[in-house]
Image (cartoon, rainbow, N blue to C red):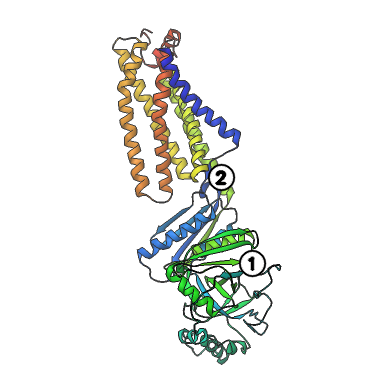
Amino acid sequence: MRRKILLPLIFILVVAYGGLALTLIRGNSPELGLDLQGGVSVVLAPTTDASGEQLDQALEIIRSRVDALGVAEPEITRQGDAIVVQLPGVKNRDRALELVGQTAELRFRPVLVAGLPPERSPTPATTTTPGATTTTPPTTTAPPTTTVPPTTTAPGQATNTASDECAAGPAGNTAETSQDAAANAAVASCDPNAVAALPKIPTTSREQDKRKSCVVLPDKPGGKSQPRYFLGPAGLTGKAVSSAKAEFQPSQGWTVKMDLTDSGSAKWDQLAQEQFHKQVAITLDSIVQSAPTIQPDQQSFSSFGGTAVISGSFGQGDAEDLAKLINYGALPVQLKKISVENVSPTLGQDQLNAGIIAGIIGLALVAAYMLFYYRLLGLVVIVGLALSGAALYVVIVYLGQSIGLALTLAGVTGIIVSVGITVDSYIVYFERLKDEVRGGSTVRACVDRAFNRSFRTILAADLVSLIGAIVLYWLAIGSVRGFALFLGISTILDLLVAYFFMHPLVSLMARNPELVRMRGVGMAAGLDAPGAPA
């Protein structure tokens, strides 16, 4: 019988404290949310009217971008027409903001003129210019190039098509000078010679950057000191790409491989023919992300889904960033940044410290009350809370390492609230034991009977809390879900500790007459029955 009591007690102690020791030895710690470790929060809103379905689709695409960044437990939610992106603990905030904030449609545009510095005359795309990509021998390090297989599609009329589809520039007004009007007209005409003759070449604004228009866009990362490109109408968009990934090729280094959809394959085939040995710009958010040159390759090209490879002097990070942008660049609605808030790690640490202090004060008050009211049995409550805390810490660290679960301030609140649920389980048991002892039985005889009857009540109460946590997690958004999740985890641990720790330990204590009859602080005194037999 004694062995039957000891086994579950040893089991829960080994699992909880053994897991805690292993976690500490490995140096693992919980993943912290934005409000506890700092990070960045971005609010995005549509530039035009957008339906709820469009916003939901945009949210999922942004979620895919953020997941590709490897951020632990990001929060991407809708608040009305706005999309809120919270990135806790992101290491490179500028890079994250750049990738998340680029919310316009991804487009593939033919380069009509490359290298347009503000102070110099432009150079046609067919001429080698500083910064432009050209064909180089395999032994020479080349700027990014796009490898496409041979194709049988007939070459299209690139110049005439571009001219027919170009959208007119913005209407003139009394404040517009003749020089500005001429520049806008030259850009709208899609004529490289007309643009080359301009004394001043305007950069196309985001509002004027239309899919079927000819545009002048800056090279990444943009700015007056960066070269610019004169680009034709988009031949295809990011929807034509089914997937893109960065790959390392021994002969080429880091490359970006694009798998095209069935319809995208035909569009890419036509664009590749029109721009053979010329550049194609990949644009996003009115910025040229890359402008590789179309070059032939010996591989076959299937009309039911082709493959294009962008290669050149890529580093691993550059290739991965470009692949992410191609994968997640097309949104159903254009978004703009409304606000960007940086939460410093210091502020997050202050909030974490405040939460820990609040928890310690609460636990100290609970421990003092349990010792005063239940005497020796109060120690069972204190040790049980420590055991639950150790097990909870191990679970939080494990989930953080395995699925990226982050502990937020709301989660800390849920854990603190769960202390009351845990303590209630001990009180239900002790009060039932008190009633049994008052009936005239010995403390030892009442321990098992009281537990069997009280555990049904504990189970019912915990199930109610668990159901409430599940419903709250299912229906809520944002930090409220963190509160519900950690409340639910703590409730499940409470049931396990009550069954494997609380009952076995009280049973062992009841078998020791000295612990039962200890004057003023023994179990009998804690059960308000000082004269009860052991």
Q: Amino acid at mark 1?
A: Gly
- For the residues labelled 1 and 2, the Cα–Cα distance comes to 47 Å
Q: Nearer the viewer, residue 19 or 159?
A: 159
x 32%, y 23%: residue? 454
Q: Secondary structure at mark 2?
A: helix
At horizontal 34% and vertical 25% (from top left) the residue drawn is 428
Q: Tag on residue 350?
A: 2
Please give the label number shown on residue 149.
none
In x, y percent, where is residue 248?
Answer: 61, 58
Looking at the picture, how far across and down is residue 57, in whole percent?
A: 40, 62
x, y percent for residue 153: 48, 78
Is 456 situated above or below 90?
above
Q: Quadrant of residue 3?
A: top left
Crowd tier of the residue under label 2, counting other residues whose Cα lies within 10 Å: few below 14, some 14–19, many 20 or above: some
Viewport quadrant of the N terminus: top left
Report the side of 370 relative to 159 (left or right): left
SS for dot 1: loop
Q: Earlier in the sequence, mark 1 or mark 2?
A: 1
Q: Residue at 44% across / 37% down in the picture?
A: 415
User: Horizontally, is 387 left or right of 139 in the view?
Assistant: left
Image: 426 above or below 179 = above
Q: Is residue 439 above or below residue 19?
A: above
**In this view, which residue lies farthest toward the bottom?**
178
**Residue topped by disc 1:** 312
**Crowdedness of circle 1 by 10 Å Cα count: few (<14), some, many (20+)?**
many
Residue occupying the far left of the picture: 439
Is residue 382 visible to us here?
A: no
